[in-house]
């Protein structure tokens, strides 16, 4: 398990790049945290770094 901490939303792209590099070829990731912890924001940043342009929604609020 790896823990990363950032102090501002402006650091999300940097965090996303670090997580992508850390994961290497692994393509199944688990994000766990309390509501409002920033999981969806982090995932949006990761997908943006990967070039995804589709809309990304929180699965908690999808229904």
Image (cartoon, rainbow, N blue to C red):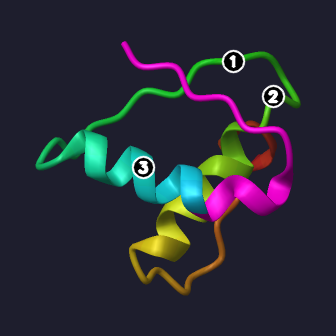
Determine the residue located farthest toward the left in the rendered image.
25
User: What is the span of residues highlighted in magenta in the rendered image?
Assistant: 1-13
What residue lies at 56% left-to-right and 82% top-to-bottom?
54
x, y percentage for residue 42? 64, 49
Q: Which mark is residue 37?
A: 2
Neighbours of disc 3 within 10 Å: few (<14), some (14-19), many (20+): few
Residue wearing tag 1: 33
x, y percentage for residue 36? 88, 31
Determine which quarter of the picture holds residue 6.
top right
Left-right relation of 27 to 55: left
Q: Nearer the viewer, residue 5 or 47?
A: 5
What residue lies at 68% left-to-right and 38% top-to-bottom?
39
- Magenta segment includes 30: no
Q: Which of the two discs, 1 and 3, labels the residue nearer the N terminus?
A: 3
Q: Is residue 58 visible?
A: no
Residue wearing tag 3: 18
**Is label 3 in a helix, a strand or a loop?**
helix
What separation in Å lies between label 2 and label 1 (alpha carbons)? 6 Å
* Quadrant of the image containing the N terminus: top left
**Is label 1 in a helix, a strand or a loop?**
loop
Asked if marks 2 and 1 touch (Cβ < 8 Å), the reply is yes
Left-right relation of 16 to 33: left
Q: Which of the two discs, 2 and 3, labels the residue nearer the N terminus?
A: 3
**Is label 2 in a helix, a strand or a loop?**
loop
- Compared with 43, 52 (above or below) is below
């Amino acid at each position: 398990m790896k823990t990363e901490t950032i102090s501002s939303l402006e650091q999300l792209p940097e965090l996303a790049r670090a997580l992508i590099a850390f994961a290497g070829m692994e393509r199944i990731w688990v994000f766990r945290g309390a509501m409002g912890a920033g999981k969806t924001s982090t995932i949006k940043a990761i997908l943006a770094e990967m070039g995804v342009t589709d809309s990304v929604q929180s699965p908690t609020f999808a229904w």
